[in-house]
Image (tube, rainbow, N blue to C red):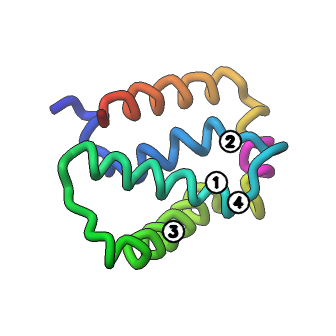
Amino acid sequence: MPEELKLNPLYTIFEKHLYDFDEHSESENEFVDKIVNDYIKFLVSKNVAVPLKWKAQIAEELRDQVRQMIVKKMYGCLTIQEFILNQKKNNKELAEKRKRTKKQYRGLY
């Protein structure tokens, strides 16, 4: 398995959405929900059973994990918007990170 695909799929999905974040049309809760829904779709695509009676609990646990990832990834930034603004200061680095993350994301499916 290629090195970049050894990452946690939830983290890969998180990064993909982080670098595609639209600060003008998305709240933080919507951002988190998109990641959780994408991850659940990924699990289903890999034939992982997600029992309906536990789906809400699983989704809430995933939301907590995503929020923890946000804090860890954006240490020093108070909001997602501030993180994106800081990333835009170095467009070349951001473009490389976005390209790497999209490649990892495509490798999930």
Q: Residue 24 is drawn in which quadrant?
A: top right
Q: Earlier in the sequence, mark 3 or mark 1?
A: 1
**Whole-percent x and y of residue 4?**
31, 34
Residue at the (76%, 59%) spot, across then down:
79
Report the residue marked by disc 4: 28
Q: How far apart are marks 3 and 2 (CA)?
A: 17 Å
Report the residue marked by disc 3: 63
Other residues around mark 3 within 10 Å, as few (<14) / some (14–19) / many (≥20): some
**Whole-percent x and y of residue 91?**
71, 24
Magenta region, residue range: 81-86
Q: In this view, does 72 lie above or below 85?
A: below
Q: Which of marks 3 and 2 is nearer the N terminus?
A: 2
**Does the CB distance between marks 4 and 3 fall below 8 Å?**
no
Q: How far apart are marks 2 and 4 (CA)?
A: 10 Å
Report the residue marked by disc 2: 21
**Does the CB distance between marks 3 and 1 fall below 8 Å?**
no
Q: Is mark 3 on a helix, strand or loop?
A: helix
Q: How far apart are marks 2 and 1 (CA)?
A: 8 Å
The disc at residue 31 is 1
**Does the CB distance between marks 2 and 1 fall below 8 Å?**
yes
